[in-house]
Image (cartoon, rainbow, N blue to C red):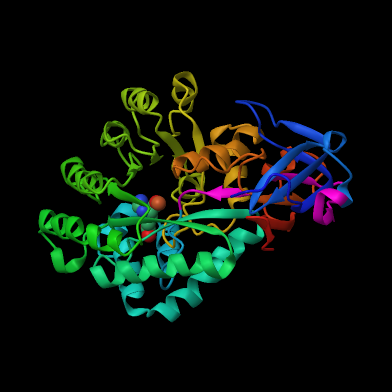
């Protein structure tokens, strides 16, 4: 039990807070303070409103030096655990080959599957941990990590175990998503339905091992059909697991409406989603996860239905989609910047997309803003105004990163 009279674990002074309180605006508190105890914020407001003398309130007092402080960033869509790289395909695409052509010729996701199957847990961790560290160094305190490069029980399990291990190593939150239905492994060629049945059979086992927080699929011409996706979602529903979907990335396959029908947390990519799909998402509170890194790398020109999202009140999140094929992107701030430039999000929308809306896309309501009761996840930034977060393309802006009341960077 939290003892409200106990001293706070920590107190941060001389900070300008971006609280993101309310539905719009930065929620700025100039000369603000943050207090925390037991990993949660117990104060977020003007220093002048502190309920006593700082030295008496908290065990340790920290000086933000007048820096801006935001909630810890939430990267709600990554595939950052994988073996190898696909720089060769990058070169092929520059010569004119398309992502779909490469996939159909046996490259793409399946080539990363080969490299991931070959990597043991130690190798997978050694390759993946630096990617997670890069995200953390740029302000990420919660990261979703998908499986989907194993496509056989043992390798999917290894990916999810490595994802959990990354969270422990770095002291940040990792949410795992089972993406067994990412691509058809070669041993199931011509037997997609049988593969989907295998995926549905692995899911309860991985879930029983505590490795699955949500379930995802790739519903696409080069992925799985709507009927197959539905099968996977039914298996998730039987276990009470939330679903999300790689929806309408390369074509309109009705993915947005499908994931909404299952009350899904999010529809991701969504470049080709229809207005009807957007309306369905609005009814179920399904978040649209924008992935401008993949949009950029694939030189996509079709914009997600941004005006429809706004008109229907669908919250928009922004994520890196960090993966070796379509988005080798290791900065959520850079994803925010791309979302502003390509999708015309405002810098404030981009920050909400990488905090409070991203948390919602993971089903987390205990983070994403600076407010008492929420997790003490926050970042101190070397910037003069909040819009700079989505303005600089890279650069070491995060001076300190705190997760659960502990400094992790
Ligand atoms: O989010 N579209 C499917 N999945 C990933 C790409 C994975 C890959 O190419 O390795 C995506 O874009
Ligand atoms: Fe993805």
From what the image shows, is residue 131 above or below residue 226? Answer: below
Image coordinates for residue 324, horizontal then vertical, percent: 44, 63
Instruction: Choose between 74 and 184: the one closer to the eye.
Output: 74
Image coordinates for residue 371, horizontal then vertical, percent: 66, 38
Q: Residue at x 57, y 47 (%)?
A: 335
* Total count of labels: 0
- The residue segment tinted magenta is 56-77
Along the horizontal axis of the image, is 283 left or right of 171? Answer: left
Instruction: Say if the magenta span includes residue 190.
Output: no
Q: Quadrant of ligand 1?
A: bottom left
Instruction: Choose between 403 and 281: the one closer to the eye.
Output: 403
Instruction: Choose between 164 and 81: the one closer to the eye.
Output: 164
Q: Residue at x 31, y 56 (%)?
A: 179
Along the horizontal axis of the image, is 291 left or right of 36? Answer: left
Q: Residue at x 30, y 66 (%)?
A: 156
From what the image shows, is residue 91 above or below residue 300? Answer: below
Along the horizontal axis of the image, is 230 left or right of 391? Answer: left
Residue 381 in view here: yes
Along the horizontal axis of the image, is 287 left or right of 255? Answer: right
Task: Give the quarter of the image for residue 91.
Answer: bottom left
Residue 301 in view here: no
Image coordinates for residue 60, horizontal then vertical, percent: 81, 58
Q: Residue furthest top?
A: 311
Instruction: Say if the magenta span includes residue 68.
Output: yes
Query: Quadrant location of the C terminus?
Result: bottom right
Instruction: Choose between 109 and 176: the one closer to the eye.
Output: 176
């Amino acid at each position: 039990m939290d003892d409200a009279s106990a001293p706070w674990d920590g107190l941060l002074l001389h900070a300008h807070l971006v609280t993101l309180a309310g539905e719009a605006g930065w929620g700025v508190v100039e000369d603000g303070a943050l207090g925390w105890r037991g990993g949660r914020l117990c104060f977020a407001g003007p220093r002048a409103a502190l309920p006593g003398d700082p030295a008496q309130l908290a065990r340790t007092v920290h000086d933000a030096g007048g820096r801006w402080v935001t909630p810890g960033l939430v990267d709600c869509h990554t595939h950052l655990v994988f073996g190898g790289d696909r720089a060769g395909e990058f070169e092929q695409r520059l010569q004119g080959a398309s992502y779909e052509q490469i996939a159909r010729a046996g490259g793409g996701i399946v080539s990363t599957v080969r490299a991931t199957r070959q990597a043991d847990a130690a190798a997978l961790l050694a390759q993946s941990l630096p990617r997670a560290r890069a995200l953390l160094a740029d302000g990420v305190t919660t990261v979703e990590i998908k499986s989907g490069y194993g496509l056989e029980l043992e390798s999917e399990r290894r990916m999810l175990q490595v994802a959990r291990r990354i969270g422990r190593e770095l002291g940040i939150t990792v949410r795992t998503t089972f993406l067994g239905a990412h691509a058809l492994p070669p041993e199931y060629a011509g037997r997609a339905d049988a593969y989907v049945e295998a995926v549905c059979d692995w899911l309860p086992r991985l879930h029983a091992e505590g490795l699955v927080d949500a379930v995802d699929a790739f519903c696409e011409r080069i992925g799985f059909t709507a009927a197959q996706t539905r099968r996977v979602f039914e298996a998730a529903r039987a276990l009470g697991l939330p679903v999300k979907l790689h929806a309408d990335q390369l074509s309109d396959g009705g993915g947005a409406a499908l994931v909404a029908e299952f009350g899904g947390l999010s529809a991701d990519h969504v470049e080709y989603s229809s207005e009807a799909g957007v309306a369905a998402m609005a009814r179920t509170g399904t978040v649209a996860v924008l992935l401008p890194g993949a949009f950029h790398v694939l030189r996509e020109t079709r914009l997600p239905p941004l005006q429809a999202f706004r008109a229907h009140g669908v919250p928009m999140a922004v994520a890196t989609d960090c993966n070796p094929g379509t988005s080798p992107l290791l900065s959520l701030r850079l994803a925010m910047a791309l979302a502003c430039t390509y999708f015309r999000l405002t810098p404030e929308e981009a920050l909400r997309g990488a905090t409070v809306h991203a948390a919602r896309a993971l089903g987390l309501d205990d983070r994403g803003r600076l407010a008492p009761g929420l997790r003490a996840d926050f970042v101190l930034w070397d910037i003069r105004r909040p819009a700079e977060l989505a303005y600089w393309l890279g650069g070491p802006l995060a001076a300190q990163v705190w997760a659960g009341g502990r400094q992790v960077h």
